[in-house]
Image (cartoon, rainbow, N blue to C red):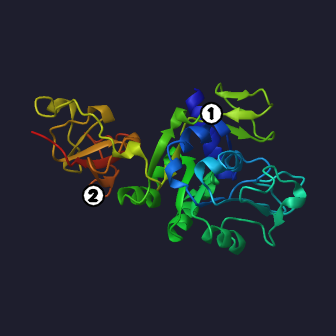
Amino acid sequence: MARNISHHLLDDAKINKKDEFYTQLADIERELKHYKNHFQNKVVYCNCDDPRSSNFFKYFVLHFKELGLKKVIASCYKKWEYDLFSPENFHHAFYYEYSGTENPCPTTNELVSFCGDGDFRSKESIALLKESDIVVTNPPFSLFREYVAQLIFYKKQFLIIGNINAITYKEIFNLIKENKVWLGIHLGRGISGFIVPEHYELYGTETKIDDEGNRIISPNNCLWLTNLDNQKRHKNIPLTQKYYGNESRYPDYDNYNGINVNKTKDIPMDYKGVMGVPITFLHKFNPAQFEIIKFRKGDDEKDLTINGKSPYFRILIKNKQAVD
């Protein structure tokens, strides 16, 4: 029940542009510890973040010397008619730059106002993006495709949070297929929850109010997406199952020359043809071990079917290391 309600929360966010899901510091620390070697002498841009309250900005200030950073920039979006990222007591979009000596907890007077609304697509925000090396933030889920497209266009490294369903978007899947982006270390329950504003209704059992009064939801269907290398993506998935002698466990598709595999752990070690696997396979995907062929569709460009029925989204892959 909680899982369905959690999906409702993020579906509602997409439909109604409710994008105020603030990442907890503990989740940021848990993921960022796997990428520390990427940040030496780099400029980090958090372009969906109020520096007075953002845990992303707080993380990089706290670890500034340890990471060997050159600068951290945090910018905050503001529309006159609707407040997306910044508190209601500030009526301008703004940004703040920290180079190791500035106030780590900036006051309103220390913030630099944008002339425009500070949208990540605005000229002012893009100018800051161009001078940065790595973008790290929780972008608006409702604009995720456009947000990632901008990062790719400007050839930026990044580590961002999105909905797991983002990997089913054609644009995002193609980037994964081309080995231009990949999943981070944590997803699902590995991201413990998001802080939401007071006007967000708390649904379901996996919600709470913490000791500091923060309202937290745990949708359990989010991921980190990145093009920063990490050790996990170079580890092989251990394969213990065999296709030959167990063919009945791996039915053929009606509309594609390939077999269906219901769980990543059941991928056979001895099958050299095309296999359809669950989308969660991407969390363990090693491009040296597997090749991604296609997403979801058969030769007729309709959803893959088995005896006329479609399994949940499948990714078609080949095992580069299949053994007889």
Q: Amino acid at mark 2?
A: Asp
Residue 27 occupies which quadrant of the picture? top right
Q: Quadrant of the N terminus?
A: top right
Whichever of callouts 2 and 1 sits on the residue coming sooner in the sequence is 1
At 40% from the left edge and 42% from the top edge, which residue is drawn? Answer: 232
Observer able to see residue 75: yes
Q: Which residue is mark 2?
A: 300
Residue 251 occupies which quadrant of the picture? top left
At 44% from the left edge and 56% from the top edge, which residue is drawn? Answer: 181
Residue 161 horizontal/vertical position (percent): 57, 48
209 vs 320: above or below: above
Instruction: Report if the CB atoms under discs 2 and 1 are less than 8 Å apart.
Output: no
Q: Quadrant of the C terminus?
A: top left
Classify mark 1: residues with Cα within 10 Å, few (<14), some (14-19) or many (20+): many
Left or right, 265 with reference to 24: left
Mark 1 element type: loop
Spatial CA distance of label 2 from label 1 is 39 Å
Q: Disc number at residue 218?
A: 1
Left or right, 33 with reference to 139: left
33 vs 226: above or below: above
